[in-house]
Structure formats: structure tokens, C-alpha cells
Image: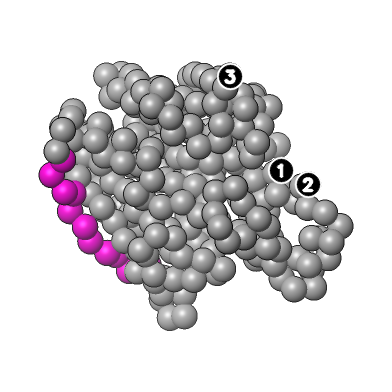
Amino acid sequence: MILSPPQSFRIPVGTGAAARDIAVARREGKAPGIFWLGGFRSDMMGGKAMALDALGAEQGLAVTRFDYSGHGISGGDFNQGTISRWLEEAEAVLATTNGPQIIVGSSMGGWLALLLARALLARGAHAHGLVLIAPAPDMTQELMLPAFTPEEHESLQNNGYVDQPSQYSDTPYRITRALIEDGANHLLFGGVIETGCPVTILQGGADPDVPQAHAIKLVTHILHDPVTLTLIPDGDHRLSRDEDLAQLRDAVMRLVKG
């Protein structure tokens, strides 16, 4: 299937020294729309994002993708990125959509999706549904900090950052002290997580970055909304194989059909 290109545009977010332009790709279509939130150091041209774009084209659904600042083709410095900063951008892009949205978040995007759902509830609105792929809520405190070596903790305090090799990149991932400290302002574990909508979680059993216990812990905090957890025993962190993308498509379409 040859897809017609989505509309590309940019929106300004922030003021003064914090101003940055955010690149957005929008496929027009009917509601509920699909709203994509990528992971840490990922961009809107990845396999899962493009599979959702293709699903939207096939089903006539609106699809919105964007790059966080410092990611992909958006402006801004990655090393200035924090959960607060990227959440502000997600809220700004969401404000450009029409009608109810199915928010699909991968890894860090899963954390942002939950924060976005909470922000919507605070305004008296709600998402149509959430699909969370290897979600990493509270990752700065729950997954990053505990894995640091003593030398990395020292670098974080003295240099303000840690450079870690990644299997997903030829260059190390820089984790800044600002990211860690800001993450503490957005922790979800320790209280009931309210989403106001159905939640589907797709989690790989062979995920080296976000263990399946983290997904199970998330389920125990969502007490008032229907949750479906699908464990994919041999699935990795990316869940981008053909069979994984089929699971993602099915999860989204179940929410579309309601």
C-alpha cells in the first residue's frame, strides 16, 4: 500500500531561552485519533510510529506523531531535556488535535502518556484510551538511578551527567542530573494512577531495559480503570517485529471499536 504523505508542520513551545520548535506529522482522518509518544532518544519515523501511521491510513483514522525537543528533526538541545519539558511539548501538540485521542506511548512515552492522561482529567477531559508499550513510568528513579555504578553516581554529581553505551546507538546516551532531578517531580508509583480511560499494556518478557515486573507494578497502581496486560514472552524492549506490530494494531483497533 502506498501511503499519501501526512501534513508536516512545526509549533513553537516555550519562551525566551526555553523556546524550541517542535516538528509534527499529522494524518487527517476521523476520531478517535491516534496520538504517538515515542521513547527516550527515539523519533517519529520509527517502526511502531510508522505502523500506526499506516494503520490510520488504512482505517481512515487521524494520526499525530511528533519529535520531542532534541529528538529527530525538532529544535532544542537533547541535553536540556527533562520530563517536564517533554510533557509540555506533548500537551502543546495534543492541543492541536481534534476529537478524542488514543494515546500510544512507548517506554518513556508510556510515562508521558500517563502524565498526559492525568493532565486531561484535571481539566475535566479524558483520553479515549491508552496503549502503553514497555511503559517506563518513574524510570529516572526506578530504572536509571538503581543501575548506576558508584563511578556513574560520582559523575552525575560532579559533572552533571552520565554517558552510557546503548545497544540502540553508536554513540553513548547522555543522562543528565537535570533529567533525574526533574523526574522526581512526576513520580506516579506510591499512589493510585488515574487515567479515566481503558488501558492496554504490551510488555516483552525478554525486555532488558524495562522488566516485566515494572509493567505488573504499574497494573497494581491502576485501580479505577480497566487494564489489559499482554505479556509477550520472547519480546524485547522495542517490540517492533512484525508479530509485535500486529499486537499493537489489534490493541489500538479494540479501543477504536470500543
Q: Callout 1: 10 Å neighbours few (<14), some, many (20+)?
A: some
| Residue that label 2 marks | 146
Give the label, 1 or 2, closer to the camera: 2
Work out whether 20 lies above or below 96: below
Work out whether 191 lies above or below 82: above
Decide whether residue 149 is among the magenta residues.
no
Report helix, strand or loop for mark 1.
helix
Q: Residue type at mark 2: give it.
A: Pro
First reached walking from the N terminus: tag 3 or tag 2: 2
Name the one closer to the observer, 181 or 242: 242
Q: Quadrant of the N terminus?
A: top left
Q: Do the residues labelled 1 and 3 touch (CB within 8 Å)?
A: no
Q: In this view, does 17 lie to the left or right of 128?
A: right
Marking on residue 50: none
Q: Do the residues labelled 3 and 2 touch (CB within 8 Å)?
A: no
**Alpha carbon distance from label 3 to label 2:** 25 Å
Q: Which residue occupies 50% across, 62% down?
A: 85
Q: Residue type at mark 3: give it.
A: Pro
Which residue reaches farthest right? Answer: 150
Work out whether 17 lies above or below 210: below
Snapshot quadrant of residue 252: top left
Marking on residue 233: 3
Q: Which residue occupies 30% across, 22% down?
A: 253
Q: Do the residues labelled 1 and 2 touch (CB within 8 Å)?
A: yes
Q: What stretch is highlighted in magenta?
A: 3-13
> Residue 219: x, y in percent?
60, 25
| Residue that label 1 marks | 142
Report helix, strand or loop for mark 2.
helix
Q: Which residue occupies 61% across, 24% down?
A: 205
